[in-house]
């Protein structure tokens, strides 16, 4: 996933994602575990807005279509992040990776001003980590993410 590439730049780890875990070498697995540990040690929690965001569409014959993700809003199921936020009141910032994610998050969750003020919660949009967002480099994305998180994680 592209977010791990950006996070690896922030944490100075040379991680390159692999699509098929069966093809990962011991060195690549170790690199992934190192970046994941570094991210979690800073209190960063990664959670998809949609529970089925990575599921592929089924073709007419019932087999999975490897190239098409679920597109229709009615086919998408949100993760219950509000329940998670209520159980974890120390969370102060929700950072959405890209404008589409932010739109989905705010449309699918009750983020009224009262909730944000009551929970002292800031919701921000980070530059998309997707390779399709080629208007800025991975290094610029990492810098923007790091600047946004530095408000809450001083030792980045």
Image (cartoon, grey):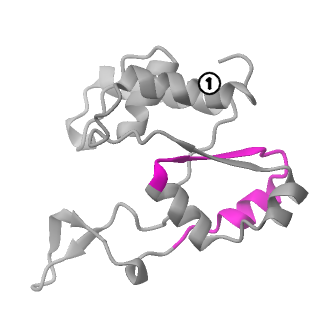
Residue displayed at 62% across by 43% down: 45
Magenta residues, start to end: 78-99
Q: Give whichever of 123, 24 is nearer the camera.
A: 123
Residue placed farthest to the right in the image? 118
Q: Is residue 113 left or right of residue 34?
A: right
The image shows residue 3 at horizontal and vertical percentages of 42, 38
- Disc count in the image? 1
Residue 30 seen: no
In the rendered view, tell whether residue 73 sits above or below residue 119. below
In the rendered view, tell whether residue 138 sits above or below residue 107. above
The quarter in which the C terminus is drawn is: top right
Is 95 covered by the magenta stretch? yes
The quarter in which the N terminus is drawn is: top left
As helix, strand or loop, the secondary structure at mark 1 comes to helix
The image shows residue 105 at horizontal and vertical percentages of 57, 63
The image shows residue 127 at horizontal and vertical percentages of 46, 39
């Amino acid at each position: 996933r592209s977010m791990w590439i950006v996070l690896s730049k922030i944490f100075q780890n040379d991680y390159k994602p692999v699509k098929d875990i069966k093809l990962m070498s011991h060195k690549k697995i170790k690199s992934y575990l190192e970046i994941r540990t570094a991210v979690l040690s800073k209190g960063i929690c990664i959670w998809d807005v949609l529970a089925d965001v990575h599921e592929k569409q089924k073709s007419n014959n019932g087999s999975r279509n490897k190239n098409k993700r679920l597109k229709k809003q009615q086919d998408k199921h949100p993760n219950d992040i509000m329940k998670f936020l209520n159980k974890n009141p120390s969370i102060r910032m929700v950072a959405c990776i890209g404008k589409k994610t932010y739109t989905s998050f705010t449309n699918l969750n009750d983020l009224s001003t009262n909730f944000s003020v009551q929970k002292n919660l800031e919701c921000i949009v980070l530059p998309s980590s997707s390779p399709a967002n080629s208007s800025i480099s991975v290094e610029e994305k990492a810098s923007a993410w790091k600047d946004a998180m530095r408000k809450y994680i001083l030792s980045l």
